[in-house]
Amino acid sequence: MRGLPLKVTSLLIDMLKYLPPADNHTPENKEAVKHSNQAIAEIMDADIIVIGAPLYNFGIPSSLKAWVDHIARANVTFKYSEAGAEGLIKDKIVYVAIASGAIYSNGPMQPYDFVAPYLKSLLGFLGMTDLKVFRAEGTAYPGQAEAALQKGIDSIVL
Ligand SMILES: Cc1cc2nc3c(=O)[nH]c(=O)nc-3n(C[C@H](O)[C@H](O)[C@H](O)COP(=O)(O)O)c2cc1C
């Protein structure tokens, strides 16, 4: 609203938007980017990555989104060329375990199944295309939590 002071602060946006190429990092840039570098180093070191994703408000928890924002870095984990986008996190096996109160893989809630397609698209974009999703779903249905969990466990094929 006009006249009201407005202050918008986002450390992540400051870090990523104004980051110069790594060779030119100032001490401030290095400090700002250290968590991102650490998260990316962990992924690059790993052969197998397991992601737990409880459904929160039809999406992923904000902590998982923050991790995504730290690992998705232009010219570090993906790049664009004339051929299009290329993911740079290669040769990984990824397992995504989704837990949800309701059931999204089939039935009336299926149109709200955003998380599995989102994580497949995002991680695939970064190069992680060997990905399997397992679901423990319906944990909030009365008396069905145990069965939902067992069904999720039984669906795991590695
Ligand atoms: C803040 C919050 C939001 C949630 N939003 C949804 C939702 O949108 N859809 C859903 O099916 N379940 C939702 N749930 C239920 C969780 O996905 C469900 O309890 C799941 O089993 C959580 O896994 P956990 O028990 O390992 O934490 C929500 C739970 C919490 C705490």
Image (cartoon, rainbow, N blue to C red):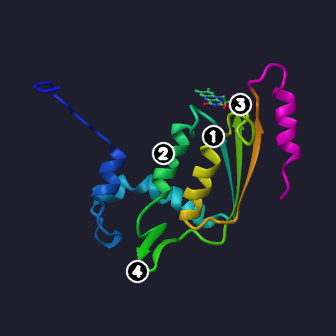
The residue labelled by disc 1 is 111
The residue labelled by disc 4 is 82
Residue flagged by tag 3: what amino acid is it? Ala
In terms of image quarters, where does ligand 1 lie? top right
Q: Nearer the viewer, mark 3 or mark 1?
A: 1
Find the distance from the CA under tag 3 to the CA under tag 4: 42 Å
Cβ of mark 3 under 8 A from ligand 1: yes
Disc 4 vs disc 2: Cβ atoms closer than 8 Å? no
> Which comes before the other along the chain, label 1 or label 2?
2
Residue at 51% from the left image edge and 45% from the top image edge? 65
* Residue 102: mark: 3
Residue at 43% from the left image edge and 62% from the top image edge? 73
Residue flagged by tag 2: what amino acid is it? Ala
Residue flagged by tag 1: what amino acid is it? Pro
Q: Nearer the viewer, mark 1 or mark 4?
A: 1
> Which comes before the other along the chain, label 2 or label 3?
2
Disc 3 vs disc 4: Cβ atoms closer than 8 Å? no
Q: Nearer the viewer, mark 4 or mark 2?
A: 4
> Which comes before the other along the chain, label 1 or label 4?
4
Find the distance from the CA under tag 4 to the CA under tag 2: 29 Å
